[in-house]
Image (tube, rainbow, N blue to C red):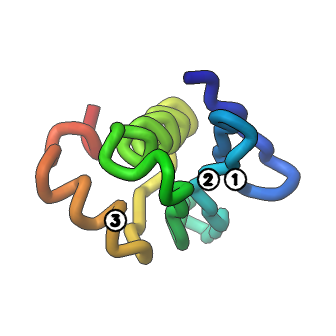
Amino acid sequence: MQIVHDPENQTFETMIDGKRSHLDYEIQKGKENKKILFTHTYCAPEHRGQGVAAALVKEGLAYARQNGYEVVALCSYVAAYLERHPQKGDE
């Protein structure tokens, strides 16, 4: 599965069999820190339960870590992912 980061539209996305799944985010930059707010995860119904959403979140978290962002999970899927994989937010 190929995941593409589209920073202009603040999304990570993948196309499988012509169906788009995506993880949306917003960047907040403050004086002392910068945050990435993961706002929405969508997985095409045909691909649910196949690890697509998890792969999108993993890619988003890797991007956050590489760029020094504090992660804020506004999306319930991202919050649940972080609860199941607490080390992924800190690696």
> Residue 55: image x %, image y %?
42, 36
In the displayed structure, would residue 66 be above or below residue 36? above
Q: Amino acid at mark 1?
A: Thr
Secondary structure beneath dot 1 equals strand
Residue bearing mark 3: 77
Tell me if mark 1 has few (under 14), some (14-19) or many (20+) residues whose alpha carbon lies within 10 angstroms of its own: many
> Residue 79: image x %, image y %?
28, 66
Toward the right, the furthest residue is: 8
Mark drawn on residue 22: 2
For residue 77, which quarter of the picture? bottom left
Q: Nearer the viewer, residue 3 or 71?
A: 3
Quadrant into which the C terminus falls: top left
Tell me if mark 2 has few (under 14), some (14-19) or many (20+) residues whose alpha carbon lies within 10 angstroms of its own: many
Q: Nearer the viewer, residue 13 or 44?
A: 44
Toward the top, the furthest residue is: 1
Q: Residue, x 23% and y 54% (percent of image)?
A: 82
Quadrant into which the N terminus falls: top right
Residue bearing mark 1: 11
Q: Amino acid at mark 3?
A: Tyr
Q: Residue, x 79% and y 47% (percent of image)?
A: 7
| Horizontal side of residue 48 vs 3, given as left or right | left
Q: Earlier in the sequence, mark 3 or mark 2?
A: 2
